[in-house]
Image (cartoon, helix red, strand yellow):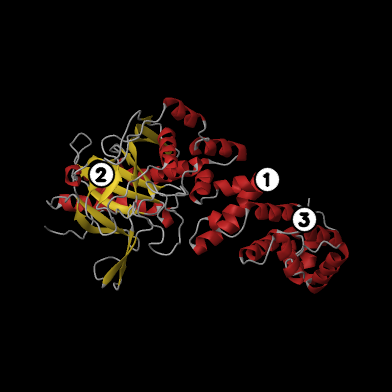
Amino acid sequence: MTTFTELLSYEDALASFDPVMGLEVHVELGTRTKMFCGCSTELGAEPNSQTCPTCLGLPGSLPVVNAIGIESAIKIGLALNCEIAEWCRFARKNYFYPDMPKNFQTSQYDEPIAFDGYLDVQLEDGEIFRVEIERAHMEEDTGKSLHVGGATGRIHGASHSLLDYNRAGIPLIEIVTKPIEGAGERAPEVAKAYVAELREVIKALGVSEARMDKGQMRCDVNLSLRPTPESEFGTRSETKNVNSLRSVERAARFEIQRHAAVLSSGGSIVQETRHFHEEDGSTTAGRIKDNAEDYRYFPEPDLVPVAPAREWVEELRGGLPEMPRVRRNRLREEWGVSEHDMQSILNAGAVDSIVATIEEGADSAAARKWWMGELARNANEQGVVVDELPITPAQVARVAAMVAAGDLNDKLARQVIEGVLAGEGTPDEVVEKRGLKVVSDEGALGAAVDEAIAGNAAIADKIRGGKIAAVGALVGAVMKTTRGQADAARVKELILERLGVSEG
């Protein structure tokens, strides 16, 4: 088999081929216990301390299905406009992997709990693209392998491996799309938008935090190329466990270019899994991809079928929250922002934080200003999303209130936020400790203004001569004297009063 390392340009790839995608997203449910036993799912425990005979697959142990896991699966299916099965069952998916102690995964095969749905996603220019859902089914996660002694953390080059089975048996929902056709050159953008919207849906339902950086949500990107939209599907590759929105987009784009280079050179695509590399956005070969028959699926004999009552399903449907796209459109109108600005807020993960800050008393403009400005900058520097910063919406609302009351200017407010993020206390405590309150005493301001005029006579004369723009230099001198703690607007008023000049 020839390995192609060069890529065709993206433009040339799309000029010659039509991409078809399939996205498989695994969502780790936020249940307190595992899918088929009572072991805790809490993160951070000592390795192999949250295990039992059932999740370790020991002889004689019997599984019992997690009722909250079933409920969560139905909620996800309903939110994705799926049909909910009146009767379904679990199956054994048989394959050997060191971190899967039973040597089979309890999953669902030909009878998923939810099927035939769709999710409408909005692209950056406002276009709505419908992604059709094949199925959403229940299964369990595997354990975790830690490869030691190599440079990359992968098994290749490692001296030995350690296995932690705490994660084995944690409930998963796998959401599988139907082939995504018709996206053309926007296929990578569609992939990213779909996973982003799906994440928002999952979070809105409250069934998972859906943190991709913590492995709570992972995406497998399947991609193939065909000569024309009318042609049969090409051979696909499956890039496994992609764990960020940006990486989903990059993986799809890279595979389009790689497939195009192989096919344009007369080669053939191998149906295989591939690893994604964050550092350069490339993928490398994993293993030859198994077909369904290779897994020897058969019904799980130790679990009874699941037959959710229609009354229960409708009760769950009636309790679904407002869906994210509907909510965003409502908020966008309430806040009076553009589609582009709303997309930026969504990309920053700041929607909920802004809403909560408004609920704490801030106006929408101030809430957006601080979360999308100073706080978004801090989050970007730290490589986190804004709602992970150590500051609460109530604290941001308090900062906004102090600015509105004239107790802080924007410069001082930024210092207050800096202090809160550094763990120096509440906004009021930071103001007190750092002495950051705006100088509002008219006598002190007047003295600083007089000093600035006396020390800058030439500039004062220009202002008296009608060059009002020069007042900025005197305002700057006063702000320097007061360590930035003066109200710049009031300082300007005082300077013009002292010089007998009207701004109008």
Instruction: Tell me the quadrant of the picture where the N terminus can be found.
Output: bottom left
* Residue 161's disc number: none
* Residue 92's disc number: 2
C-alpha distance separating marks 1 and 2: 54 Å
Residue type marked 3: Gly
Location of residue 78 (image quadrant): top left
Residue labelled with disc 3: 406
Residue type marked 2: Arg
Crowd class of label 3 (few under 14; some 14 to 19; many from 20; radius 10 Å): some
Q: Mark 3, mark 2: which one is toward the viewer?
A: 2
Secondary structure, mark 2, is strand
Residue 329 in the image: x percent, y percent?
A: 53, 36
Residue 349 in the image: x percent, y percent?
A: 51, 50
Residue at (73%, 64%) from the top-left corner? 429
Q: Nearer the N terminus, badge 1 or badge 2?
A: 2
* Residue 363's disc number: 1
